[in-house]
Image: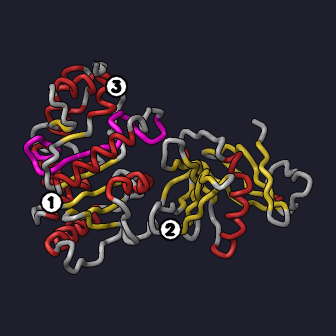
Amino acid sequence: MEKTDPKALAARKWFGYGRWEASYWFVGMEPGGDDDLASYESWLALAGPSRDGLIDCKDHHDDSNRRSVKGTTRWHADGVPPIQSTWGPLIRTVLAFEDRPRDDNDVASYQRDEWGRSTGKTAVIELSALHARSIGVDVERTLHRSERIEVIHKQLDYRKPQFVLFYGRSYKSEYEKIIGDFGRDDWAWRAETLCVLVVHPAYRYAPGGEFWVSLGMWLRAAVASGPNGSTPPCPHPPPFRGKRRSKGQTLSAPALVDSDEAPLKRDGIVAGRILYDGWNIRVERYLPVGGYELIGYYERSRPAHYGRKKVEIDAVFDEWAKLKPQQPELVKATWRAAQFVPAFDPPSGAIHAGCAVLEDDGVEVARIFKAPPDRAIWVWSTP
């Protein structure tokens, strides 16, 4: 007998919003928001006996709001609703693809009236049905993963939408189980469907609106050309060179795309990675559920020193990965000469010229000492 627990059933059978017959598919990692039972109860009521996996976005939010999930109706409010951070860029892509007006009011109107509707052109699909506000929230996001991937794969081959945007580059390997290899430029044809991998629109350093417009225009040209035509070069986000604020000073922040990347392995298995933008090094650990999580930065590393810093970070990564910062973007290691390090006391074998001080929002948590020839020593700081 089939389980009747709404959340357990949704974990297998709820795939998102819209309809499988839609022309445009958007495949993401998981729905945002709080893991509220009312959302799953609403899905069960709206899906009915057929439970084909997709329901109407507006109907679900209206019904969930009546049950207890407050605030979800604002995305479909009368007038000009606020633009949801993930949906907005994707909607701008649709509007550009259809050569329609695409200012903020147009995006908000499309979100209110057309996005993920059971009679519309968009299917908003998730690898996991369980709500989570971020990848750091502990939910069973891999539950029924293989089964769900197989369902999406079969529906894709049967329905043949015009294009599918897969967003969230850290899930590339999972998405490729659906469509095969994306190729060097992160796009590929699967029969008559154009499949494209893009950065998550709500990622902190995701590109702005112009990129999503150019992506929509490229999709239009590529789809018109077809799998056997001459597809123009796919647009890519420019390397991020913006600024972030950390304890009174600005730092450049490496993006997850178009930056030098090096895996950190233990016994041949990926444990994390570092990304370098030419100035700061972003340090991430690999999550058991898949994907990466930021754990801090090694700041102000000149290209000539980058090779040594990679070795240094690799040597102390096991200790660094134990950190569970509330705001990982405020965790930074900075090299300081010995005279600028309070109570400087290098361990045996370490150089005496200085060390890297690791701070969490300005509070020292550890020190990283260089030790020749290619070693580094992590020392936790006493509170």
Rendered view: 297 above or below 290: below
Amino acid found under the numbered disc labelled 2: Ser
**Amino acid type at image mark 1:** Leu
Range drawn in magenta = 114-137
Residue 131 belongs to the span the image colors magenta:
yes
Q: Quadrant of residue 37?
A: top left
| Quarter in which the C terminus is drawn | top right
Q: Which residue is mark 1?
A: 95
Which element carries disc 2, helix, strand or loop? Answer: loop
Mark 3: secondary structure: helix
- Circle 3: residue type: Ala
Choose between 337 and 122: the one closer to the eye: 122
Would you name the residue on which mark 2 appears? 259
- In the rendered image, residue 323, in percent from the top left (x then y), is placed at 64, 41
Q: Which residue is mark 3?
A: 8
- Cα separation, mark 1 vs mark 3, equals 36 Å
